[in-house]
Amino acid sequence: MSGWTLYFPYAVAFWLFVIGCFGITQSRNLIHTVLCLTVVQSSTYMLLLSVDFHAKAGAPIFGSTNPPGSASVDPILHALTLTDIVVGATVTALMLALTIQIHRRRGTIDPQRLRPMSE
Amino acid sequence: MSPRIRTVVYLFSAVLTFGVLMYASGGLPPFGAFSGPYTDFVLQIGTLERSVYNIPTAVNFDFRGFDTLGEEFIFFTSVAGVLFLFSAVKAETQQHAEPMESERARGQSGAIRWFPIGLTAFIAALGMDLAAHGQLTPGGGFQGGAVFGGGLACIYLALGLPAFVHAVKKETMDFLEALGAFSFGALGMAALFIAGAFLQNIMPLGQTGATVSGGTIYFLSCAVFVEIACGFAVLMLVFLKQTQQTEEDEG
């Protein structure tokens, strides 16, 4: 690997971030907005996992083929990614609950038709 | 803001953000070259001192156990937040009568109704397996709990909402979820009094590679499994009840 491939995974992460934001700005449905937010969030998984990659290293789970102490990718960032995923799932649940509430109170989940609290 | 202006503003800031981030990534180590002393240290002592093979699990429940306590309570409070949001509605609109047999359960062939039941058992077993061997193979409490919760969803797919509500008792799930969260903190506090540091390993480590090994890590993983599995069950329960209510509101 050389040249541009050395930074390509970072570019993918940033692209996911930017394209997820595009979805949020163009959204006509709050459920779609929430899903776009998960795309934005997956850019952080991509970034963490591309930082922790080691060429010629195995998974940080040891066994008979890779005995303890052998070359391995970074387990810290794997653990952080796991935290990230859990937090992402809870944020999604909370946002979807809010979406249901908004639909019940305002009768629409189109963010462009939702005006600031007026009633 | 009109859609056109919105798009123009977006494009401008997106190009700017992407450019700045790419410029900043030049300061990161190239792909595949990162190496930190913390990593080498953890890889070296993970198996020796904690007798686990799955190092991310050791990081989660031991080396960075305090972070995981925070993470676990993020999950706990957000489930509580969802329950709170929906309980406000209940008070407003009065509880509806017993939900009728849902549309979904009617008019399905036997195969579609009963296949997911077998699948529930299989997925639930897989979830427990992932959690129980989190210190040896890929998996752990969080992953196992999420898989187990997904398995419970099959009950709904097969038999509809009434059966799901019947099988997954909300009070029990609430209690078990809180119990899981409590045990994590309690194990940490016990370590504080016995060994002098929060979440320090106080259990016998066992033989590396055995089903029950890794000391405190194993029990913390199980506590998290119970919390996450029951948390997912509660979330599904309240969301699915909402669909029922909305149908009734509209019908």
Image: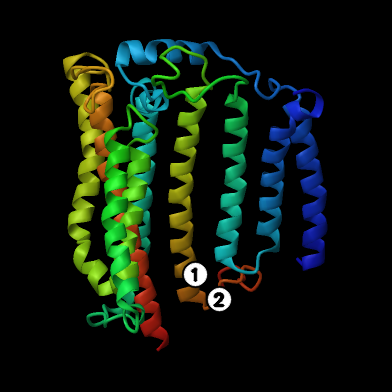
- Whether residue B137 sits left or right of residue B197 in the image: it is right
Q: Position of residue B225 (x, y in %)?
A: 28, 41
Q: CA distance from mark 1 to mark 2?
A: 7 Å
- Secondary structure at numbered mark 1: helix
Is B43 drawn above or below residue A106 in the view shown?
above
Mark 2 burial class by Cα count in 10 Å: few <14, some 14-19, many 20+: some
The answer to which image quadrant residue A110 occupies is bottom right
Q: Can residue A52 be seen here?
A: yes
The number of numbered badges drawn on the structure is 2
Residue positioned 76% across, 24% down in the render: B26
Residue type, mark 1 in image = Ile
Residue tagged 2? A108
Residue positioned 37% across, 71% down in the render: B242
Which mark, by number, is residue A102?
Answer: 1
Q: Earlier in the sequence, mark 1 or mark 2?
A: 1
Could you tell me which chain the residue with mark 1 belongs to?
A: A
Q: Quadrant of the N terminus of chain A?
A: top right
Q: Position of residue A96 (x, y in %)?
A: 47, 61
User: Do the numbered discs 1 and 2 sit on residues whose CB atoms are within 8 Å?
Assistant: yes
Residue positioned 49% across, 39% down in the render: A84
Which mark, by number, is residue A6?
Answer: none
Mark 1 burial class by Cα count in 10 Å: few <14, some 14-19, many 20+: some
Could you tell me which chain the residue with mark 2 belongs to?
A: A
Q: Position of residue B19 (x, y in %)?
A: 80, 37
- Whether residue B221 sits left or right of residue A106 in the image: it is left
The answer to which image quadrant residue B31 occupies is top right
